[in-house]
Image (cartoon, rainbow, N blue to C red):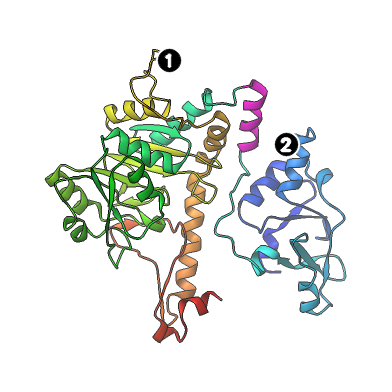
Amino acid sequence: MTRTVAANLMREDATLRQVMQRLNEGVFGVVFMVDRENRVQGMLTDGDVRRALLAGSQLSDAAAPGMNRNFVVGRSSAPHAENIALLSDRIRHVPVLDEKGRLVDLLSWAEMLRIPLMQPSLGGDELKNVSDCITSGWISSQGDYVRRFEDQFAQSHSGGHAIAVSSGTAALHLALKAVGVGAGDEVIVPDLTFAAVANVVIHCGAVPVLADVDAETWTLDVQQVAGKISSRTRAVIPVHLYGHPCEMDGLRDLAEQHRLRVIEDCAEAQGALFRDRQVGTIGDVGCFSFFSNKVITTGEGGMVTTSDPDIAEKVRTLRDHGMRPGKRYWHDHAGFNYRMTNLQAAVGVAQMERVDNFLRRRHQIGERYIERLGNVPGLIMPPRQPWARTIFWIFSMLVDSDQAGMTRDQLCE
């Protein structure tokens, strides 16, 4: 029995909590319950566990009553193509059993026919926390989970200020407004990044100025930035692309020389390090995203980090319609409704409890890709500078068509 298949097996006396923990470890979304002879008796997915909990079961209860006993199986005596043909949009897992009903192989739609960019892992206390919000009635932006999530995030990022917001884009917009970027100003952004970075500059009435990226890191080239600075430049936004940090020392020196604000876009890089410093703590402001494909998720959501109390106060005010803290319905600024809900923060609190595991798993996957692909002619591995710890948000490669004997698009196909 392969190691992967063995990981999908659990005894019939396992609890729902144990099944959730196993599913969270990465077993293609399914666990099979077996008897003492290792004969498969039923299967459980995330959906089966959730249905059991919603029906009144506790995490400490046995998982077996909630398992699915009626499912499609393949046979070890059948041709492989015949077993593969059992997979479909509706049937995502096909266990292959021997004549005694023991699992010998697992055919998975996700493994064999589709490799997702990211699948949110919601096997911790997410459901419990959200249920707590619903039971208590605190589902909007007022609630204890927002404060708890901000405190967790602040403590994990050098103990500065952390302000929860509605999205990573909102975080960038608030950061620019809080440092005073406005009409007629210029903000230097990388030419290789998502459109939101330039969009928020435009929403401030400012002009995004594109600077090229460095070939070794795929992030802002300091010399290129230096050549783009003008009398109207007010800020620079280094994007830690695909989880690899920018070269921040040079950017900070340049910013100090020209009195520019540095706003780090850490949407894809939570947990990445630049010379042992966490991204989001190096510039004036850090901006994070919690979209469903990020390191941790709240569905939609974001966070602003800063060590500057004045910037933090301005961000908090602007995210809440510009309302003065301590004086309700008194608006000093034309602010925004960029608040995070208590429901989203409840998910975030549970996610932060497992963020180290998420990062460890990304590192394992990245190392495995490099081990298997690093010596393939024509494939150029993603950046891994000695002064950085990348988190492999996604594993991107460059293709040298001549050496690889095919183009990038042909390789994708």
Q: Which of 4 and 378 lies nearest the eye of the viewer? A: 378
Q: Nearer the viewer, mark 2 or mark 1?
A: 1
| Amino acid of disc 1 | Tyr
| Amino acid of disc 2 | Ser
| Quadrant of the image occupied by residue 28 | bottom right
Residue 306, how many percent across, how many down? Answer: 31, 35
Mark 2 element type: loop
Residue 126 within the magenta-colored segment of the rendering: yes
Query: Is residue 105 shown left or right of residue 351?
Result: right
Q: Is residue 204 visible?
A: yes
Q: Which of 274 and 104 lies nearest the eye of the viewer? A: 274
Q: Which residues are magenta?
A: 125-137
Instruction: Look at 48% across and 53% down and name the residue there.
Output: 360
Q: Quadrant of the C terminus?
A: bottom right
Q: Which of 137 and 156 lies nearest the eye of the viewer? A: 137
Residue hosting label 2: 60
Q: How many marks?
A: 2
Residue hosting label 1: 329
Q: Earlier in the sequence, mark 2 or mark 1?
A: 2
Please, is residue 381 above or below residue 241 in the view? below
Instruction: Look at 67% across and 69% down and name the residue there.
Output: 2
Does the magenta stretch mainly form a helix, a strand or a loop? helix
Q: Are marks 2 and 1 in contact (CB under 8 Å)?
A: no
Instruction: Look at 48% across and 36% down and name the residue there.
Output: 166
